[in-house]
Image (cartoon, grey):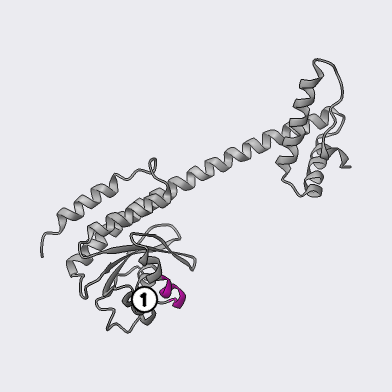
Amino acid sequence: MTDTRSPLLRCLRELAQLSVLDHSLPEMLDRIVAIANDAVPPSEKVGLTLDVAGAVSTAAFTDDDVPEIEADQYGADAGPCLDAARHGLVFSVPSTATDDRYPEFSRSCAAHGIRSSLSTPVIARSSKRAALNFYATEADAFTPDDVDLAEAFAKHAAVAIENAEAYYSAKQLASQLGIALETRVVIEQAKGILIAQGRTGDDAFDVLRKASQRENRKLRDIAADLVGAAERRAGSRNGHGGALAPPAASSGP
């Protein structure tokens, strides 16, 4: 066996240096497939197939031909990329000209000048199933050594992808929690204004809720309008007293 470790180690170091702080999730995936292309020397194009509960897509690719190549197998629900993702096994097409297992995929490859392919699973703990798909313009391009390289890289890529998804999911959740907290604060402020005008807490919330339904607007937007109107009214009174009349919400029962 030839020594294939040096290019793989170089690519794994580059993969390990990818930072979620410097890249969005799509950018991370684009970098991963680009590095994968370098990790397996015969490869000329790479795509990343994602299968999430049967919804399949090419999430990242190094060449615009790749989504077109893979689209036909998605439509037929049959192809090496799908099999690798779904079964967790390596699927190779040594010659797209002679392979009869995946006719739609083979025809699409031939139309784009692809003569051989190698698909290796990207196995993660999440519900997503994925595969890295390597393409070459030569038949029989991928040797057993190349299969080993692809599998080794895919294992590390799975960790990188899963960590990136976990980071961005946590970031999105934190943003959603922040929005939820801001929403609760403005609603409580609006209720306080209505309570100050003589309504009970339940009645105040009911006024906001009915105004939201009547105007087909979000509850927090109704509350924000009420708070904003109160602040403007307070600023214009110049220290003089007076009741604060809520805007649209005031017509509720």
Side of 57 relative to 106 (left or right): right
Side of 234 relative to 130 (left or right): right
Which portion, as a residue range, is magenta?
71-77
Side of 226 relative to 156 (left or right): right
Q: Who's the residue at 22% across and 75% down the image? A: 139
**1 lies above or below 169:** below
Looking at the rendered structure, the secondary structure element under dot 1 is helix
Three-letter code, disc 1: Ser
Where in the figure is residue 12, as x and y percent of width and height? 24, 51
Q: Which is more toward the observer, 106 or 13?
A: 106
Where in the figure is residue 70, as x and y percent of width and height? 39, 70
| Figure quadrant of the C terminus | top right
Q: Main secondary structure of the magenta part?
A: helix
**In the image, is residue 102 part of the stretch drawn in magenta?**
no
Where in the figure is residue 66, as x and y percent of width and height? 36, 66
Q: Residues within 10 Å of mark 1 (few under 14, many from 20)?
A: many
| Figure quadrant of the N terminus | bottom left
The quadrant in which residue 241 appears is top right
Residue most extreme to the left:
2
Residue most extreme to the top:
239
The quadrant in which residue 41 appears is bottom left
Q: Who's the residue at 32% across and 54% down the image? A: 32
**In the image, is residue 74 part of the stretch drawn in magenta?**
yes
Q: Who's the residue at 31% across and 63% down the image? A: 46
**106 lies above or below 246:** below
The quadrant in which residue 82 appears is bottom left
Tell me the residue that label 1 is attached to.
108
Q: Who's the residue at 22% across and 61% down the image? A: 40
Where in the figure is residue 38, as x and y percent of width and height? 23, 57
